[in-house]
Amino acid sequence: MSNNEAANEQTFIHMQVDELAKVLDSHSHVVVDIRDPNAFASGRITDAVHLTNENIADFLREADPDAPVVVCCYHGHSSQQAAQYLVSQDFTKVYSLDGGFTQWQSQYPDKVAR
Protein backbone atom coordinates (compact mmCIF):
# COMPACT_ATOMS: atom_id res chain seq x y z
CA MET A 1 0.00 0.00 0.00
CA SER A 2 1.39 3.40 -0.95
CA ASN A 3 1.41 6.39 1.40
CA ASN A 4 -1.24 7.99 -0.77
CA GLU A 5 -3.64 5.08 -0.27
CA ALA A 6 -3.11 5.18 3.48
CA ALA A 7 -3.83 8.92 3.56
CA ASN A 8 -7.07 8.41 1.65
CA GLU A 9 -8.37 5.98 4.28
CA GLN A 10 -8.74 8.83 6.79
CA THR A 11 -12.34 9.91 6.80
CA PHE A 12 -15.01 11.54 8.92
CA ILE A 13 -17.48 9.72 11.17
CA HIS A 14 -21.26 10.01 10.97
CA MET A 15 -22.86 11.27 14.19
CA GLN A 16 -26.54 11.10 15.11
CA VAL A 17 -28.22 14.06 16.81
CA ASP A 18 -28.84 12.03 19.98
CA GLU A 19 -25.10 11.27 20.18
CA LEU A 20 -24.30 15.00 19.95
CA ALA A 21 -26.94 15.80 22.58
CA LYS A 22 -25.15 13.50 25.04
CA VAL A 23 -21.78 15.28 24.67
CA LEU A 24 -22.90 18.87 23.97
CA ASP A 25 -23.03 20.04 27.58
CA SER A 26 -19.52 18.71 28.28
CA HIS A 27 -18.04 21.08 25.67
CA SER A 28 -15.76 18.21 24.60
CA HIS A 29 -16.72 18.66 20.93
CA VAL A 30 -16.47 21.79 18.78
CA VAL A 31 -19.63 22.25 16.70
CA VAL A 32 -19.13 24.15 13.44
CA ASP A 33 -22.15 25.26 11.42
CA ILE A 34 -21.65 25.79 7.67
CA ARG A 35 -25.13 27.10 6.83
CA ASP A 36 -25.65 30.58 5.41
CA PRO A 37 -25.40 33.61 7.74
CA ASN A 38 -29.17 34.23 7.91
CA ALA A 39 -29.91 30.62 8.84
CA PHE A 40 -27.13 30.65 11.44
CA ALA A 41 -28.41 33.92 12.93
CA SER A 42 -32.00 32.68 13.16
CA GLY A 43 -31.08 29.50 15.04
CA ARG A 44 -28.11 27.24 15.71
CA ILE A 45 -26.92 24.49 18.01
CA THR A 46 -25.91 26.01 21.34
CA ASP A 47 -22.24 27.19 21.25
CA ALA A 48 -21.85 26.37 17.55
CA VAL A 49 -19.19 28.30 15.62
CA HIS A 50 -20.20 29.71 12.24
CA LEU A 51 -17.71 28.42 9.67
CA THR A 52 -17.63 30.27 6.34
CA ASN A 53 -15.29 30.67 3.38
CA GLU A 54 -14.24 33.97 4.96
CA ASN A 55 -13.16 32.53 8.33
CA ILE A 56 -12.06 28.97 7.47
CA ALA A 57 -8.37 29.96 7.31
CA ASP A 58 -8.58 31.47 10.82
CA PHE A 59 -10.38 28.38 12.10
CA LEU A 60 -7.76 26.04 10.63
CA ARG A 61 -4.97 28.12 12.18
CA GLU A 62 -6.54 28.54 15.64
CA ALA A 63 -8.44 25.28 16.25
CA ASP A 64 -6.99 22.27 18.03
CA PRO A 65 -6.73 19.58 15.31
CA ASP A 66 -7.04 16.86 17.96
CA ALA A 67 -10.28 18.18 19.45
CA PRO A 68 -13.41 16.42 18.15
CA VAL A 69 -15.18 18.61 15.55
CA VAL A 70 -18.82 18.13 14.55
CA VAL A 71 -19.85 19.71 11.23
CA CYS A 72 -23.48 20.76 10.93
CA CYS A 73 -25.40 21.89 7.82
CA TYR A 74 -29.12 21.91 6.97
CA HIS A 75 -29.79 18.18 6.48
CA GLY A 76 -26.45 16.39 6.85
CA HIS A 77 -25.34 16.37 3.20
CA SER A 78 -23.02 19.37 2.72
CA SER A 79 -21.48 18.69 6.12
CA GLN A 80 -20.00 15.45 4.78
CA GLN A 81 -17.86 17.30 2.23
CA ALA A 82 -16.83 19.90 4.81
CA ALA A 83 -15.98 17.16 7.33
CA GLN A 84 -13.85 15.35 4.77
CA TYR A 85 -12.07 18.65 4.03
CA LEU A 86 -11.22 19.07 7.74
CA VAL A 87 -9.86 15.51 7.77
CA SER A 88 -7.67 16.44 4.80
CA GLN A 89 -6.39 19.38 6.89
CA ASP A 90 -5.12 16.94 9.56
CA PHE A 91 -8.04 17.15 11.99
CA THR A 92 -8.11 13.75 13.70
CA LYS A 93 -11.72 13.37 14.94
CA VAL A 94 -14.25 14.88 12.57
CA TYR A 95 -17.96 14.10 12.56
CA SER A 96 -20.75 14.97 10.13
CA LEU A 97 -24.09 15.49 11.89
CA ASP A 98 -26.64 13.23 10.18
CA GLY A 99 -29.97 15.01 9.77
CA GLY A 100 -28.25 18.37 10.27
CA PHE A 101 -29.74 21.35 12.02
CA THR A 102 -33.23 20.51 10.74
CA GLN A 103 -33.31 17.26 12.71
CA TRP A 104 -31.53 18.83 15.69
CA GLN A 105 -34.11 21.62 15.93
CA SER A 106 -37.02 19.17 15.76
CA GLN A 107 -35.58 16.84 18.44
CA TYR A 108 -33.84 19.37 20.72
CA PRO A 109 -35.65 22.72 20.45
CA ASP A 110 -34.41 23.61 23.94
CA LYS A 111 -30.78 23.38 22.71
CA VAL A 112 -31.14 25.97 19.95
CA ALA A 113 -29.47 29.35 20.38
CA ARG A 114 -30.79 32.48 18.69
Image (cartoon, helix red, strand yellow):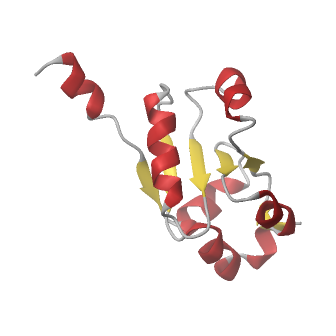
Residue occupying the far top of the picture = 3
Q: Quadrant of the N terminus?
A: top left
Residue name at image x 52 percent, y 46 percent: 82
Q: Is residue 19 above or below residue 86?
A: below
Pick the front one: 49 or 4: 4
Number of numbered labels in the structure image: 0
Q: Residue furthest front?
A: 54
Task: Residue 49 in the image: state x and y as whole percent.
Answer: 76, 46
Q: Residue at x 65, y 80 (%)?
A: 107
Q: Is residue 27 left or right of residue 75?
A: right
Placement of 52 over or under 92, stated as above or below? below
For this orientation, the residue located farthest to the left is 1
Q: Residue furthest bottom?
A: 106
Relative placement, left or right, of 114 versus 50 is: right
Relative horizontal placement of residue 17, taking residue 6 as reference (left or right) = right
Q: Residue at x 73, y 59 (%)?
A: 36
x then y, percent, for residue 59: 70, 31
Q: Residue at x 64, y 44 (%)?
A: 29
In the image, 61 versus 92, the foreground residue is 61
From the viewer's side, name the closer residue of 35 and 69.
Answer: 35
User: The C terminus lies in which quarter of the figure?
Assistant: bottom right
Question: Can you give x and y, in whole percent of width and height, for residue 27 in the image?
Answer: 72, 45
Q: Is residue 25 above or below residue 11?
A: below
Picture quadrant where residue 109 is located? bottom right
Please state the horizontal and vertical placement of residue 85, each as a whole percent of the image.
48, 38
Find residue 69 and report its image quarter. Answer: top right
Is 113 situated left or right of 105 in this image?
A: right
